[in-house]
Amino acid sequence: MLQKDVKLDNTSKTWVLEKHIDFLQSFGKERHQYESSMMEFLRMSGMYWGLTALYLINDGKIPKEDEIFEYIKSCEHSCGGYSPAPGHDPHLLYTLSAVQIACLLNRELELPIEKIVLYVSKLQQDDGSFTGDKWGEIDTRYSFCALACLSLLGKLNEINLVKAVEFIKSCQNFDGGFGSRPGAESHGGLIYCCVGSLSIAGRLDLVDADTLGWWLAERQLPSGGLNGRPEKLPDVCYSWWVFSTLNILGRDHWIDKEGLKTFILASQDNEGGGFSDRPGDEPDPFHTLFGLAALSLMSHDKILPIDPTYCMPKAVINRLGLKPQTLS
Ligand SMILES: COc1ccc(S(=O)(=O)N2Cc3cc(-c4ccc(C=O)o4)ccc3N(Cc3cncn3C)C[C@H]2Cc2ccc(O)cc2)cc1
Ligand SMILES: [Zn+2]
């Protein structure tokens, strides 16, 4: 079976740092008005992706802090949850993004912390799992959102952590990976959510690090890029989901880092800045953050250090006194 992959043209992409700063600062303005309006349904997350990426390459400086904090407040609901934009429904995904942005701004203490804690803890089910909102979809992505959100606020003890870990354990597969629910197939993004949750809970002892490390290293293709499942094309965002998980498990040396770096840099847009999912596609803030975050984990100069568990700047995680578990 021919292995699906992309062919990198041999022009080595230079590192266009200044253009990435310009791309991120202009997203949402005239230049990207259309895409930005199309993404209103995820705007709060889009702001977390764009602002975290900017923080990493702009020496921790974020423009218009007050305007950003006002926007977060405009998306707050009386139940303690946050919506992606004013007038939309609250959801755990955007509640995490709002808390992450507030932590970037060093203003998390100005949030209605007790109301947020109540909103998140009400989403936990009897089996320890979490739904994303009142419509009741269960997914291990939401376990990660709940644990990351509460631990950032110093309130991890307000949910049943033992049951939460039990549910994640019930989603572990024979290949060492994890899926969205018990019995669901292993997938790079969900493995990151489950291993990240176990890292926050201090329960990485439940992970079969060698079997999972092998499965994750198998995601690397000849192009150097990583895919999320066997037989899929490589994609820059899996550089983060797969590589940060290998980093948490202490097995990031099991892949060819130079090859991964080449693939990520080949996915830069040399004209307008930003990163796309693979060379030649349109850049977006989502892939720009995850490309830069993976480069940060490979200690690329000019990018501030990032925490592999929270996908947030190390400086912010240290300031909050958080110590997510990693394996050596
Ligand atoms: C362009 O098509 C999509 C498809 C799915 C989504 S998603 O919201 O379900 N989501 C996040 C996501 C975001 C973008 C994007 C474009 C512009 C912006 C502005 O900030 O963000 C693009 C893709 C994307 N996906 C889809 C994807 C990424 N790589 C391969 N695919 C198919 C991921 C998707 C799921 C998700 C992942 C992480 C997360 O924190 C939230 C949602 C969004 C746009
Ligand atoms: Zn992607």
Image (tube, helix red, strand yellow):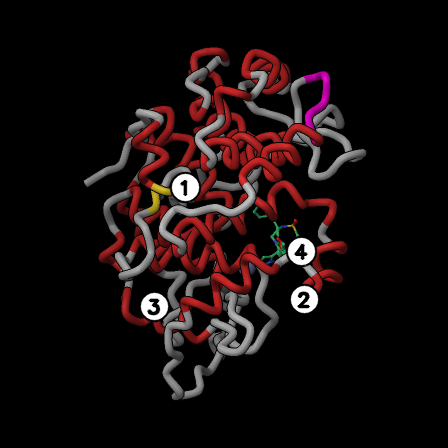
Indicate the quadrant of ligand 2 in the picture: bottom right
Relative to 78, does residue 200 appear above or below in the rendering?
A: below
Query: Where does label 4 land, which residue?
Result: 28
Check whether the beta carbons of the residues at disc 1 and disc 3 lie within 8 A of each other: no
Q: Nearer the viewer, residue 183 or 198?
A: 198
Q: Which mark is residue 312?
A: 1
Disc 3 or 4, which lies upstream in sequence? 4
| Kind of residue at badge 2 | Arg
Q: Say few, some or many: other residues with alpha carbon within 10 Å of mark 4 (under 14 / 14 to 19 / 20 or more).
A: some
Q: Residues within 10 Å of mark 2 (few under 14, many from 20)?
A: few
Q: Which residue is mark 2?
A: 31
Quadrant location of residue 58? bottom left
- At label 3, which amino acid type do we have? Lys
Distance of label 2 from label 4 (alpha carbons): 8 Å
Q: Nearer the viewer, mark 3 or mark 2?
A: 2
The residue under label 1 is which amino acid type? Met
Which stretch is magenta?
Answer: 75-79
Foreground tag (1 vs 4):
4
- Which mark sits nearer the N-terminus, 1 or 3? 3
Residue count near mark 1 (Cα–Cα under 10 Å), binned few <14, some 14–19, many ≥20: many
Q: Measure how far apart labels 1 and 3 are at the Cα level.
A: 20 Å
- Regarding mark 2 in the picture, which secondary structure is present there? helix
Can I make out residue 28 in this image?
Answer: yes
* Residue 209 drawn at (x, y percent): 29, 42
Q: Is residue 323 magenta?
A: no
Amino acid beneath label 4: Gly
Q: Nearer the viewer, mark 2 or mark 1?
A: 2
